[in-house]
Structures are given as C-alpha cells and as structure tokens.
Amino acid sequence: MKNNTLIAVDNSGSYRVYLTITTDMAEEAMQIHKCTPTAAAALGRTLTCAGLMGLMLKAYSDRLTVQIKGSGPAEQILATADALGRVKGYIANPGATLPPRADGHLDVGGIVGQGSLTVIKDLGLKEPYVGTIPLVSGEIARDFTQYFAVSEQQPSSVALGVRFTQDLAHVSCAGGLIIQVLPDAREEAISALEEMLFTMDDLTLLIGDAEGDLYRLLHLIFGQLPEEFQPKVLEERTIGWLCDCSKERMEKALISIGKKDLSQLIAEDKGAELTCQFCRRTYRFTEDELIALLQEASHE
Ligand SMILES: [Zn+2]
C-alpha cells in the first residue's frame, strides 16, 4: 500500500504533526457498513483519528480502541488501530441520518449526540490504559482535541474530514491532521500555529487542492509559517483498513459462549452463522463442526 501519512516536526522543535489522507479507508468503511453519508462521516473521522493515534503507540504489538457512545441515532462508534496503522471499526446504526445543519454540513454532532469518548490502550501491561471524557460537540475532531488535553495532558489540535461525491454515494476525500505542542515549544510558534489554524480552510478542500499529494498538502497548510516553524518530515507511514477476523477466531468465540449455549445451537439451529461486526464477513458452521467445537469446549 502507498504511504498516506506524514509525521513531521518543525525546525524549532515546537510541535509535531501527523497528517494523513484516508480516502480509501473511509470509502471502504462506508461501503462495508452501508452507511448513510452522515454515518460515514462520523465513522470515517473516528477511523482516521484512531489510525493516527495508532501510529503514536510505541511498540508494534500495542493497540488501541476508541469508543464513542452518544445519545443520538448513531448510538455507538467503535474503532481499533494498531501501531502498524491497521484500522477497523463500525457504527452501531449505519442508517443514522438527520437533516443537514443550517450551514449545509452533515449533522455528525446530531447523530452522535451527547455522551462519552473512551480510549482503551493495550500496551501489553497487566491492565490496559483507559481514558474517558464527556463529548464536547459530537463532531469528533473537537472531542479528540479535548481528549488529548484532558486525558493525556497533551495540548493538541485535531482536524478530521470526510467529503462525498455529488450523489453522496461515495467518499471523494478524507483525511486527518493532529498537531501536538511539544514541551519546549516557543511562544511565537504557538501563536503562529493558532493564527494558521484560525484561517485554515476545511481539510477536505485542501486535500482536493493538493490533488491527494501529502507533501503539497503539508505545504498548503504550513507553508505560510516563518521558516523556523516550518515542519520537516521525519517519517512516511501508512494507515489503512484491515480486518483480521478468521474462522479460527470465530471458533474461539463459539467455544467461549459455553457448552450449554453451544449444545442449544446444535439442537435447535443445526449450525451457526456468525458475522464479523467489523467487516460484515459471514462465517458458517455446520452441525458437525459445532459438535467438534463442543467436544473441544468439554476438554477445557
Ligand atoms: Zn472481520
């Protein structure tokens, strides 16, 4: 897969940037889950931010889960990402939709509603790290900005966007930007960044202007800053959709429901059909396969 993400630090060591174009991932998620445009925007933004946060993890085996629970019709959005940029996720109600907002934008905050944003990081320790904040707007980017400030004491600015083709059937571009202020940041750098963000165009418009070229996009966003605060690219990375489900994993899930429920599936349904909630792939188990799993469960 082509690299779609840049990690950069400015010349003065004042801030770090994560910049990504995730059009393919947002489109894949939209089609897999048959999302309405508003649901696809909410899911695409969440997947994009989760993917960027995955790249911030230190060890290759680390992974994180983002869970957004709200009072709106979307109900819940869940995304997982690992340090290699592999992302998957779902929205509990992909049919969620509301009329557009007064400014013509999709009402992502409306379908999410009020609730909480939780990040669970599995860093290979005994207990996972868990951080939760109340949602600020349900528009996702502002909620993550708040999460970084409150839960990780990391002053950041998050921009996330998903734009659609004219018929609203497909994602035409998607991306994300996270700017982290570093501990020894210069005051002038922070004010220059604030001014830049204040006048910055919508991220998806800039991705369109850059014609999908990451380096051009970086320049479009930061090019006006003084030389000493210009970002220097450290790394190119990739974020993409990947579901790692398999028949073996589904077998483990079936064994874990217990002998009683397995026996019931055999007696009443003569088989089982399990659908992965992340990629909607279906796994079928025959009666004989279930009997074998029941025997395995009895040995445990
Ligand atoms: Zn799957």
Image (cartoon, rainbow, N blue to C red):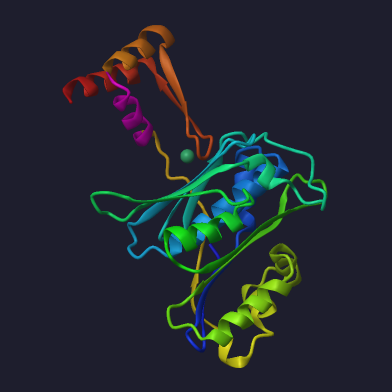
Q: Nearer the viewer, residue 245 or 176?
A: 176
Quadrant in the picture for the C terminus: top left
143 relative to 150 in the view: left or right? right
149 relative to 21 in the view: left or right? left
Q: Position of residue 17 (x, y in %)?
A: 53, 74
Q: Residue at x 55, y 52 (%)?
A: 47
Name the residue furthest bottom.
Answer: 227
Q: Position of residue 218 (x, y in %)?
A: 63, 76
- The stretch drawn in magenta includes residue 293: no
Magenta stretch secondary structure, dominant = helix
Q: Nearer the viewer, residue 269 or 29?
A: 29
Q: Position of residue 299 (x, y in %)?
A: 17, 23
Q: Residue at x 63, y 83 (%)?
A: 192
Q: Nearer the viewer, residue 12 or 4?
A: 12
Name the residue furthest left.
Answer: 299
Q: Nearer the viewer, residue 132 or 276?
A: 132
Task: Give the tally of numbered discs.
Answer: 0
Q: Residue at x 30, y 16 (%)?
A: 291
Give, as a single range, the part of the protein colored magenta.
248-258
Q: Residue at x 43, y 58 (%)?
A: 151
Determine which quarter of the picture holds residue 48.
bottom right
Determine which quarter of the picture holds residue 208.
bottom right
Q: Position of residue 184 (x, y in %)?
A: 44, 83
**Residue 28 in sight in this render:** no
61 relative to 281 in the view: left or right? left
**Residue 61 in sight in this render:** yes
Query: Residue 106, relative to residue 246: is it above or below?
Result: below
